[in-house]
Amino acid sequence: MEGVMGILRLRIKKGTNLAVRDMARGTSDPYVVATLGHQKSKTKMVDDNLNPVWEQDLTLTIKDPTVPIKLTVYDKDTFSEDDNMGTANVDVNPYVECLQMGSDLDHLPDGTKLETVQPNEHNHLAEESYIIWNKDALTQDMVLRLTDVETGEIEVQIEITPIEDHRLSIFQNQIGLHGSKST
């Protein structure tokens, strides 16, 4: 897998207090689209529900650590274009920082907190969350506040499994977190 630094598994758990887009019925038919670069994957649609439970896994590959994960919630419409119900971004850089630990990760016990991620302008976290080392993967449970919409949050778990060959070498051709090339 040329240039792939990790396999990203997004578990889209549920939505809370999502926006009404089917005004006549006072509800929506939501689904989530995950985008990472040119890759897209989507959940199933849940009928008539502003608090849907998806519990669905979506899988993408991480190639460029500067590209955020974008999650967009839509309302499925039959006779018109689907309505946007909000967007949330997840910054990939905290995972890159953790992956830079390289082979040191292999010696950590499961459940080790690697980094605390605070809500900021690069992500849409509703509250702080933690990147944790579990069974050879980075995991993070989070609640994301949807933007460009009147209300709504989605609960997501991210799991990134590093590609062994690229755990350290991927950074040689990437721009470092402080604007300089890694060596």
Image (cartoon, rainbow, N blue to C red):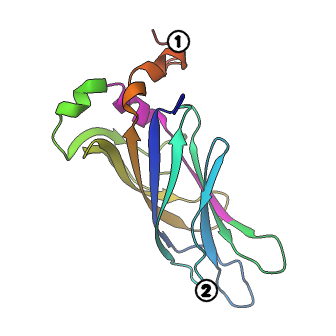
- Residue lying at the far top in this picture: please name it: 183
Q: Position of residue 163 (x, y in %)?
A: 40, 34
- Residue appearing at x 76%, y 78% in the figure: 77
Question: Label 2's element?
Answer: loop
The type of residue carrying mark 1 is Ser
Is residue 89 found inside the magenta-colored segment of the image?
yes
- Residue appearing at x 61%, y 75% in the figure: 45
Query: From the viewer's perspective, is 134 left or right of 172?
Result: left
Q: What's the mark number on residue 48?
A: 2
Looking at the image, which is closer to me, 81 or 179? 81
Residue stretch in magenta: 85-101
On the question of residue 3 being in view, the answer is yes
**Which of the 4 image quadrants contains residue 167?**
top left
Q: What's the mark number on residue 180?
A: 1
Query: From the viewer's perspective, is 111 left or right of 176?
Result: left
On the question of residue 123 being in view, the answer is no
Q: Which mark is first along the chain, 1 or 2?
A: 2
Q: Position of residue 26 (x, y in %)?
A: 67, 87
Residue 27 vertical position relative to residue 2 in the rendered view, above or below: below
- Residue lying at the far right in this picture: please name it: 80
**Which of the 4 image quadrants contains residue 36?**
top right
Is residue 96 found inside the magenta-colored segment of the image?
yes
Residue 19 vertical position relative to residue 142 in the rendered view, above or below: below
